[in-house]
Image (cartoon, rainbow, N blue to C red):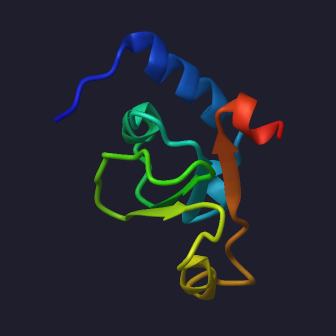
């Protein structure tokens, strides 16, 4: 598999630490980048779906089971992802690069 710098995984793990991962089977990641967040999720035993929102378009070359990559600005396909949510059980969790989330 792909290797990631330990500091990149540690940074992603810090974003995840603040997220209520146990509340949802679906995680939205803003700015997947090199996929270090996927490695951090794997380290946490995450088994849900990951939806990557890429505001600047498809810079992602990462593939993983359950991973959906949607490119801005239109995010085509987002409606299909949302349809899969269980409105009673799933509370979509959004994590990501703090620099991108601040915009």
Q: Nearer the viewer, residue 71 or 46?
A: 71
Location of residue 79 by image quarter: bottom right
* Residue closer to the observer: 61 or 52: 61
Question: Seen in the image, is 62 located left or right of residue 73?
Answer: left
At a point 53% along the width and 79% down the height, the residue shown is: 77
Rendered position, 69 above or below 36:
below
Quadrant of the frame with the N terminus? top left
Image position, residue 59 (x, y; %): 43, 45
Taking the view exactly as shown, the residue that stands out farthest to the left is 1
> Between residues 76 and 96, which one lies in front from this camera angle?
76
Q: Is residue 48 above or below residue 13?
A: below
Is the residue 36 above or below the residue 85 in the image?
A: above
The percent coordinates of residue 53 (x first, y second) are 58, 56
Left or right, 55 with reference to 67: right
- Point out residue 87 in the picture as x, y percentages from the top left corner: 73, 84
Q: Which quadrant is home to the C terminus?
A: top right
Residue at 22% x, 31% y: name it: 2
Q: Residue at x 62, y 54 (%)?
A: 22
Q: Is the residue 71 above or below the residue 63 in the image?
A: below
Residue at the image position 37 percent from the left and 34 percent from the top: 39
């Amino acid at each position: 598999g792909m290797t990631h710098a330990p500091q990149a995984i540690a940074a992603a793990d810090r974003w995840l630490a603040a997220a209520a991962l146990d509340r949802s089977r679906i995680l939205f990641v803003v700015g997947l980048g090199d996929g270090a967040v996927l490695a951090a999720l794997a380290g946490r035993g995450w088994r849900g779906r990951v939806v990557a929102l890429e505001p600047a378009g498809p810079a992602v070359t990462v593939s993983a089971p359950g991973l959906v990559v949607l490119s801005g600005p239109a995010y085509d396909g987002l409606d299909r992802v949302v349809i899969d949510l269980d409105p009673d059980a799933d509370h979509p969790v959004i994590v990501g690069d703090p620099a991108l989330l601040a915009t």
